[in-house]
Image (tube, rainbow, N blue to C red):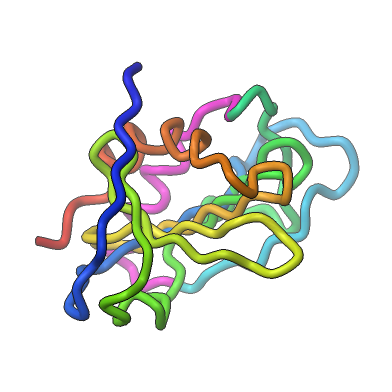
């Protein structure tokens, strides 16, 4: 699959986005799984998130899918929490900033937020539900894992515009 990355500057009126850092119920785990707060989206967003959950890949960036604690169809993790997805998160405040950094990976727009002492966090833009992907420090300068989520997000979380 060809990856397309380009930098964008979202406007103050940037559309809805969803970030999903989740794991599938029924995935085998060793121990309790990565601790991941579960979002509380509206019913329509939750339905899109459940559909996304069913489409998520078994591996991302060479890391296998692991469990989350608590288990939820709104959260997923790979590599014992190195990559975490949450779907149905609230709209990030930075999304209103016209100077906020954003990228596009295979047709899906992502707001970029650098976290001090950790890797980046990405939240989808222009989607009916916000999907959030957090990466640990080993991915500090690597947006490659987002390509694994582009297809599932495109197929299951409708555009907001």
**In this rendering, would 108 be left or right of 86?**
left
Pick the front one: 11 or 72: 11
The image shows residue 15 at horizontal and vertical percentages of 20, 68
What residue do we see at 47% from left, 57% from top? 122
Residue 126 figure quarter: bottom left
Whether residue 150 appears in this view of the structure is yes
Q: Position of residue 73 (x, y in %)?
A: 53, 51
**Residue 24 to residue 37: above or below:** above
Point out the image quarter for the N terminus: top left
Place of residue 42 in the rendered image (x, y in percent of width and height, measured from the top left): 35, 73
Q: Is residue 78 left or right of residue 30?
A: left
What residue is rendered at 57% in x and 64% in y? 114
In depth, the one of 120 and 17 nearer the eye is 120
Q: Quadrant of residue 151?
A: top left
- Is 8 magenta? The answer is no
Residue in the image at 53% along x and 57% along y: 86
* Picture quarter with the C terminus: bottom left
- Which residues are drawn in magenta? 41-60
**Magenta span main SS:** helix
């Amino acid at each position: 699959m060809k990856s397309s990355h380009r930098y964008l500057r979202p406007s103050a009126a940037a559309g809805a986005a969803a970030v999903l850092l989740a794991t599938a119920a029924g995935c085998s785990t060793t121990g309790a799984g990565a601790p991941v707060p579960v979002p509380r989206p509206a019913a329509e967003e939750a339905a899109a998130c459940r559909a996304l959950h069913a489409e998520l890949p078994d591996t991302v960036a060479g890391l296998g899918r692991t469990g989350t604690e608590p288990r939820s169809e709104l959260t997923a993790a790979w590599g014992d929490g190195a990559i975490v997805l949450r779907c149905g998160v609230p709209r990030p405040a930075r999304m209103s900033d016209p100077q906020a950094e954003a990228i596009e990976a295979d047709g899906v727009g992502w707001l970029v937020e650098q976290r001090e002492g950790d890797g980046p966090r990405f939240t989808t833009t222009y989607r009916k539900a916000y999907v959030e992907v957090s990466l640990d420090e080993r991915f500090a300068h690597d947006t490659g894992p987002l390509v694994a989520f582009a297809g599932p997000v495109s197929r299951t979380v409708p555009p907001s515009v």
